[in-house]
Every structure is written in structure tokens, then in C-alpha cells.
Amino acid sequence: MIRAPQPPAAFEARLRQIGADRYHDKHPFHALLHGGGCTPDQVRAWVINRYYYQHSIPMKDAAFMSRVEDPALRRAWRKRIEDHDGTDENEGGIRRWLRLAEAVGLDPDYVASCQGVMPATRFAVDAYVRFVRDKTLMEAVAASLTELFAPAIHATRIEGLLKHYPFANDASLSYFRKRLKEAPEDVAFGLKWVLDHADTAERQDMAAAALTFKTDVLWAQLDALHSAYVEPGRIPPGAWLPGEGMALARAS
């Protein structure tokens, strides 16, 4: 028996429920970070490992675009690369993240080198890039829909960091403030595209599974971070050790 697809409103609600159940805003590390409970070194470990995700996003999007034959879709998606890599008028999200790295005392060149990134971070992020490169276009777009839930966590993060950490100011938090505007623009297009193209029950299942996979990617990164730098504090070989990559070390 052929299953009928869910109506668009019901399918959108199904996608949003995945975020309500599984998005990484619920991870204990984020509660610690936003509540002021992180030590300076725990914040630095987060900045270093999250950078690997940030710097991989344009490569993920380029891999996606290389398979897109529709010029309209390529034009819409190109904005995502420009948002991260920057343009003549916009320095881009990667540079803004490195400003955060400087603010917490890290050498931005060290962070940009991706030295000290945990193996688990690499595995999770690289798996996401491969997913977008190898899966159907519809699954790749659906995986990006975690942006549905991002503005809320960015707002919470800005409020929490400003309240609890001396490094937090308009310059150091510019990445998150910019994403408050960029993420809704990106996801409005992506959500409509998925709702239009997931036109069978099977494709809706594929889209939901892709979004679930992406929430797993985000959650796995924080699990590894918490295990290495919070509890039990077992830093894996090759990962950043407190004191490494500091801005003062470069100046000395």
C-alpha cells in the first residue's frame, strides 16, 4: 500500500519537532557555557573545535553546489558561502569567529590551522560534508534545516556570554549577532525547497532522517567536548591542551 505524503503544514511540524527533541541547545555543555559555568580553557576548547565546523561549512556548500544544475538554486545557495567566506563588503563568519578566538586569548593563526581539533570533531564534521556531497540534493538541503532552531540559541548565547564572561562584547560576539539575520534568510529558502520537493512519503522520511542526522552531528561534537574538557576530562591524543596556541605565546 502506497502511503500518502503528509500535508505541508504537518510535515513542517514534524521537522520542527525533530529540533524540539534533538537540537543541541539542550546539551549540558551549552547549559554550562551560557550559564557562566565554563572555565576560560573550556571556552577556548569550544572555540577551537567549533572553528573546524565553521571553516568546513563553505566547503560543504561548495560540494553541494557542484552537483546543482539549476542556476536559481545555485544563486540562492551561493550566499551561504559568501556569508562565511566573506566578500569585499562583508568580512564573513569565519573571520568573525577568529575575532572571538582572539577575544578569549587564542592566537587566531593557531585556531585557523585546525591544530588541536579533537578527532571526534573531525569525524563528525567530515561526515556531514560527505553526507552533503554524496546524498540526494533533497537530503542535503534538509540537513541544513537545523538553521530553523539556530536563532534562539544565538540569542541565548549572546545574553549568557555578555552576562558571565569578560571577553564578551559587540566585537567578539559579532558572529552570533550576524547569524541572527542570516540564518532565518537561509532557512526560509531551504524549508520551502524541502517542502516543495519532499512530495512523497518516502521523500519526507528521507528529509526527516537527514535532519535527524544533522542534529546527531551537532550533538556528537558537544559530547566529545564535554568528555574531553569537562567530565571526565579525558583529552584525546593530539587535541588542544590548555596553554597551547595562546596569543601571548606568539608575541613572546
Image (cartoon, rainbow, N blue to C red):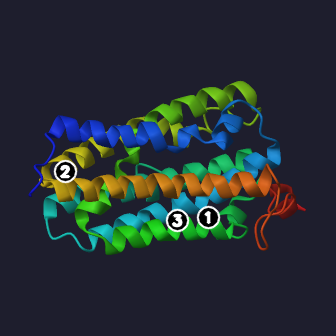
Residue 77 in view (yes/no):
no
Residue pointed to by mark 3: 125
Measured as percent of width and height from the top left, residue 121 is found at 61, 64
Mark 3 Cα within 10 Å, few/some/many (few <14, many 20+)?
Answer: many
Residue pointed to by mark 1: 121
Q: In the picture shown, does residue 114 fall above or below 162? A: below
Work out whether mark 2 precedes mark 3 in sequence or the reverse, and give the earlier one.
Answer: 3
Residue pointed to by mark 2: 193
Measured as percent of width and height from the top left, residue 64 is found at 31, 68
Secondary structure beneath label 1: helix
Q: CA distance from mark 2 to mark 3?
A: 24 Å
Q: Quadrant of residue 14?
A: top left
Dividing the image into 4 quarters, which one contains the C terminus? bottom right
Disc number placed over residue 33 in the picture, else none: none
Give the amino acid at mark 1: Thr
**Which residue is at the front of the view, 120 or 17?**
17
The residue furthest right is 252
Q: Residue at x 50, y 55 (%)?
A: 216
Give the amino acid at mark 3: Val
Give the side of residue 243 with respect to residue 194, left or right. Answer: right
Q: CA distance from mark 1 to mark 3?
A: 6 Å
Mark 2 Cα within 10 Å, few/some/many (few <14, many 20+)?
Answer: some
